[in-house]
Amino acid sequence: MILCIETSTTNCSVAIAKEGKVLAMLEDNEIKYSHAERLHHYIEQVLEEAKIKITNLKAIAISKGPGSYTGLRIGVSAAKGLCYALDIPLISIPTLQILALQADTKSDFIIPMLDARRMEVYSCVFNNKREQIREIKAEILAENSFMEYLNKGQVTFIGNANKKFKEVCSHKNAIYLDQKLPSSKEMCLLAASKYKKNDTENVAYFEPYYLKDFIGG
């Protein structure tokens, strides 16, 4: 039994999975962040729905970032607290990998993109086997962004930064999956795989992958 927590965007998402299969899930996406108020309540609800005692959990999986500084901090703090209290391992999963798994597509490439203020995004690139082929970057969108992939074949862009890129990109090979945010649902299989490999984090020292410094306002 693994508890999966995703709070990197406005979507507050929690799931319970057994061997990668979702037993219960609860999430809510609002424009304003309310993770601090909702997260622990959601955890209690999914445990109750799955009829699982918290002491039956074998690990906690967290979306590690990049994403919202505040959202990541809240999710990681909750996950670390539970790991300490239950003496179970912490598993971290890259947020953009979680998002890319929602792209059920035959495209040659998948590019998950999360809004990072103004025309900046967090992004990376996966091939059609969902293997990551370019590192995660914080980058400014421009008309020639991702051309090396767009000129090779169809590219599916997924995430809350699509609206920005549509304003500057009209390439015929660009496909947009809008209204998609990272979800705990896609974390479950990844978490199970990491658990079997004993691929876990040091609970005391783990920090979210913020990618760039926090900017208030």
Image (spheres, helix red, strand yellow):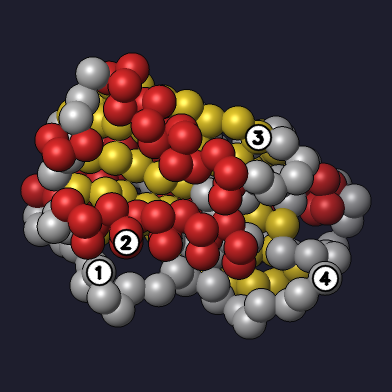
Determine which residue is flagged by label 1.
203
Q: Label 3: few (<14), some or many (≥20) within 10 Å?
A: some
Local secondary structure at mark 2: helix
Name above or below for residue 150 compared with residue 201.
Answer: above
At mark 1, the secondary structure is: loop
Q: Which residue is mark 2?
A: 80
Q: CA distance from mark 4 to mark 2?
A: 27 Å
Q: For the residues labelled 1 and 3, say whether their Cβ atoms are less than 8 Å apart.
A: no
Mark 4, other Cα within 10 Å: few <14 / some 14–19 / many ≥20: few
Asked if marks 1 and 2 touch (Cβ < 8 Å), the reply is yes
Indicate the quadrant where residue 141 lies. Answer: bottom right
Sequence order check: which comes first, mark 4 or mark 2?
A: 2
Q: State which tag comes first along the sequence, 1 or 2.
A: 2
- Would residue 173 be visible to someone looking at this image? no
Please state which amino acid type lies under the numbered disc 1. Answer: Val
Image position, residue 25 (x, y; %): 41, 25
Are the residues at dot 3 and dot 4 in contact (C-beta closer than 8 Å)? Answer: no
Instruction: Quickly name the residue at label 3.
Output: 29
Q: Do the residues bearing badges 2 and 3 touch, measured as CB atoms within 8 Å?
A: no
Q: Earlier in the sequence, mark 4 or mark 1?
A: 1
